[in-house]
Amino acid sequence: MPWLWITLGILVIIIFYVAGTYNKLITLRNRIKDQWAQIEVQLKRRFDLVPNLVETVKGYAKHEKGTFEDVIAARNKFASATTPEAEMEASGELTKVLGRIMMLTEAYPDLKADKNFLKLQEDLK
């Protein structure tokens, strides 16, 4: 009879261990989803700010048309991304193109002092 109680005790311990592990895995999965959602919010916010930045810079650098076209193409690629991996790749390309716009500011001192541009630049970071 004592072997029955021992077996029952071990079975209860195993059940509690499996339930605890399952709950921990679910918690971790939900945490990952939440963190990814926060990243997506920031990427989409940045995506939405790009047209404002382009319009602000356009007024100062009309002859830099190729750079603006690259920004628009990178933004469109981000908009059409359907997987997290594609979003991250498109975001990387957008970052490179935005870096080129930031370099344009060195050639236009008035642009560097423009309040709208400075605010947009800070928001994009």
Image: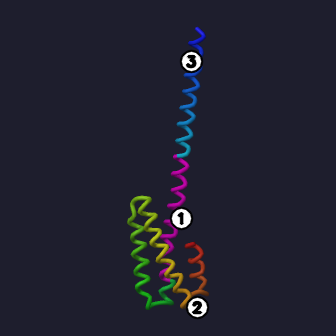
Residue 87 magenta-highlighted: no
Question: 10 Å neighbourhood of mark 2: few (<14), some, or many (≥20)?
Answer: few
Compared with residue 41, is residue 33 higher up or lower down, i.e. above or below?
above
Q: Which residue is mark 2?
A: 109
Q: What kind of secondary structure does the magenta stretch mostly adopt?
A: helix
Q: Which residue is mark 3?
A: 8
Instruction: Decide if residue 73 is on the left or right side of residue 47.
Output: left
Label of residue 42 in the image: 1
Residue at 55% from the left image edge and 73% from the top image edge:
124
Where is residue 110? Give x, y as percent: 58, 91
Camera-nearest label, 3 or 1:
3
Secondary structure beneath dot 2 equals: helix
Instruction: Decide if residue 14 is on the left or right side of residue 93.
Output: right
Please state the extent of the stretch shown in magenta in the rendering: 29-55
Disc nearer the start of the sequence (2/3): 3
Q: Amino acid at mark 1?
A: Gln
Question: 10 Å neighbourhood of mark 3: few (<14), some, or many (≥20)?
Answer: few
Label of residue 92 in the image: none
Q: CA distance from mark 2 to mark 1?
A: 29 Å
Residue 37 magenta-highlighted: yes
Residue furthest to the top: 1
Q: Amino acid at mark 3?
A: Leu
